[in-house]
Image: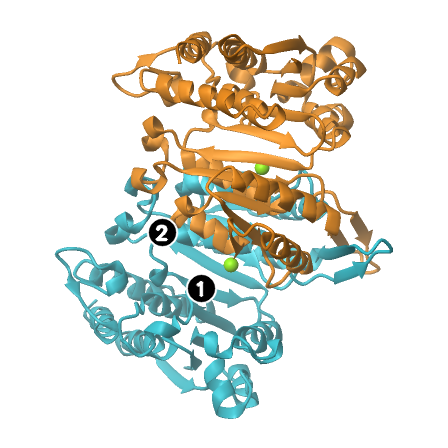
Chain colours: A orange, B cyan
Amino acid sequence: KMYKIAVLPGDGIGPEITEQALKALKAVAEHFGHEFQFTEALVGGAAYDAVGHPLPKETLDLCYSSDAILLGAVGGDKWADLPPELTPERGALLPLRKLLGLYANLRPAVVFPALANASTLKPEVVEGLDIMVVRELTGGLYFGEKKREDLPDGTVRVTDTLVYTTEEIVRIARLAFELAAKRRKKVTLVDKANVLESSRYWREVVANMAAEYPDIEFNTMYVDNAAMQLVKMPKQFDVIVTDNMFGDILSDQASQLTGSLGMLASASIGGKIGLYEPSHGSAPKYAGLKRANPIATVMSGAMLLRYSFDMEKEAKAIEDAVTEVLKKYRTRDIMEEGLQLVNTDEMGDRIAEQILAG
Amino acid sequence: KMYKIAVLPGDGIGPEITEQALKALKAVAEHFGHEFQFTEALVGGAAYDAVGHPLPKETLDLCYSSDAILLGAVGGDKWADLPPELTPERGALLPLRKLLGLYANLRPAVVFPALANASTLKPEVVEGLDIMVVRELTGGLYFGEKKREDLPDGTVRVTDTLVYTTEEIVRIARLAFELAAKRRKKVTLVDKANVLESSRYWREVVANMAAEYPDIEFNTMYVDNAAMQLVKMPKQFDVIVTDNMFGDILSDQASQLTGSLGMLASASIGGKIGLYEPSHGSAPKYAGLKRANPIATVMSGAMLLRYSFDMEKEAKAIEDAVTEVLKKYRTRDIMEEGLQLVNTDEMGDRIAEQILAG
Ligand SMILES: [Mg+2]
Ligand SMILES: [Mg+2]
């Protein structure tokens, strides 16, 4: 079978980091005898500059006809003052996720053995950390009705609304349990069930579902306590499942625990076609300098293989290669005394070689 | 002038830690020539057991006729299964805050020099940390309209509502700027203005107010970034002001950064009469064992002096005494090799002596 991958390099450092992920994926294809077809298209500011829209129809068509999407990064000051619907984030990323039905955002927070000292936390607290935050991505407070009302006395009342339906909760929870089954078999639901009605319902639905997974350990935690526990004892977590807003906060907090954001991938899944991208941004000021760390994008490629193509050993081959390469080679952001400094391209080459050698 | 202080020891370790705070306050009275009148009353489970309600009328009357309230802690498994309106938290703390108009929760996260190693973060990251989280306490998502609707197809839709009015935002922001003026003169508004209408309005109101305080540095930060920055570079913050929900999460995250929750005070202010209590709970399993750390309650006494009585040097005297005592004496939770282990009472005595000696 031939697997079609849409490649959207995007803005800033997007093109140069995406290129390294492709090297890794091509090495996997060669090593494991798969056929991947890569097709590039414009997205974000680059697309706006070329054709006047951050998500051109050709790009969208390509995505629809692909098996998975690999994205670099979008955005930059250059396009920040455009009308919202033309900015790279609101005009491309949000509609793309919505059109593809990507309701689940997966954000791994992984500490590589060689990088335990990169964290602001003590090495013994984060060594071996491997958390997967599963964030509901298309509902909740961020997408509810918004109002601004002028009151008779001249003051203002503002309102945001948090809404969830059974179906929205069931599908994200199902995904979290299935994920946990292939990991360390633990799911933590984070909510605020002591005060929010939505949280109380999430807790009912997810606890019910937990009963269908007797071999998965299930617990619940209030969001304020979760924010504390992530600082105090982060290794207690395997899969965290939570709503859009809590997931937004906790996935970023968890990623910062690792101290090396240049290493962290992300996936937006749930629909037929998954979208994979580094969790960091487009870093316009480093664009073209070839000093960006491509590993987050390479690791996004590994997630793509695992979640869209069900290629577990291939995904693992990329992850193992990265672990191995980090013992000797480093980009600037994670450089340490005694190791060899490499640029973006060289890091991609070393990883690809390691995959082929593995 | 005679200052009247209502003393509500509460449940669990509440009585024994409150007693130590009184020792410190009495030492201050003696040393600085003030007159404090302390009157005790029942609250929480202790009140329920004695008279059938967690917030008896006599207690409430005492609070109304006092200049400030010092509270130990309430709650415990023993009362967890009572009807909500009779539990210590919902039946006593929430109504007390509401009746007294306490819309601002102040949560300091302070790392004492002697305890920089107690944190899970590296000492250099948290040494000297001194953050004040100012949380709006009576509005927002936690108090908005809640709904659970059965849909025609048999599924359910749940709703929570986030509402703020101009007045609610103005008063908490004013308080944050006034606080910052007496501290390191920096206010960070945390919101999610890129997606929430309420946040956009908070940002307008608070940014406008910032213009009235030209000598206070003002910045804004999205809540997910704030959760990252608290891990990455927590010392960048002085005063953080934010809504009820974000404040709930960030104040707990910030407190955990210190690694020593037994040290952290809190204040609920905004009305005529302020309420001061440790930010930790009632720890029922340690009740009566005299091993609890009373410092959070002692420090709450210092906040009481500062915010309710405007006694800055007296508050400072307590804080300095604690700093000094920690160089030699420790309760179990913060014990370190080479220092002297003391129990709850002894810690209270050492601090009071130090205030008198200071
Ligand atoms: Mg975020
Ligand atoms: Mg809290």
Which chain's residue wears label 1? B
Q: What amino acid is at disc 1?
A: Ser
Q: What residue is rendered at 37% in x and 59% in y? A: B261
Name the foreground residue: A201 vs A176: A176
Q: Quadrant of ligand 1?
A: top right
Quarter where residue B139 is shown = bottom right
The quadrant of the image that shows the C terminus of chain A is top left
Q: Is residue A332 above or below residue A209?
A: above
**Residue B43 shows in the view:** no
Q: Say which residue label 1 marks.
A: B266
Label 2 crowd bin: few (<14), some (14–19), many (20+), radius 10 Å:
many
The spot of residue A16 in percent (x, y) is 54, 11
Name the foreground residue: A274 vs B11: A274
Dot 1 beta carbon under 8 Å from ligand 2:
no
Q: How many numbered tags mark residues here?
A: 2
Q: Is residue A9 above or below residue B15?
A: above
- Residue B258 is tagged as 2
The spot of residue A233 in percent (x, y) is 38, 48
Quarter where residue A94 is shown = top right
Q: What residue is rendered at 58% in x and 35% in y? A: A106
Which chain's residue wears label 2? B
Q: CA distance from mark 2 to mark 1?
A: 15 Å
Instruction: Identify the secondary structure beneath mark 1.
Output: strand
**Residue A347 shows in the view:** yes
B137 lies left or right of A348: right
Q: What residue is rendered at 43% in x and 73% in y? A: B73
Name the foreground residue: A334 vs A135: A135
The spot of residue A307 in percent (x, y) is 59, 28
Quarter where residue B276 is shown = bottom left
Dot 2 beta carbon under 8 Å from ligand 2:
no
B77 lies left or right of B293: right
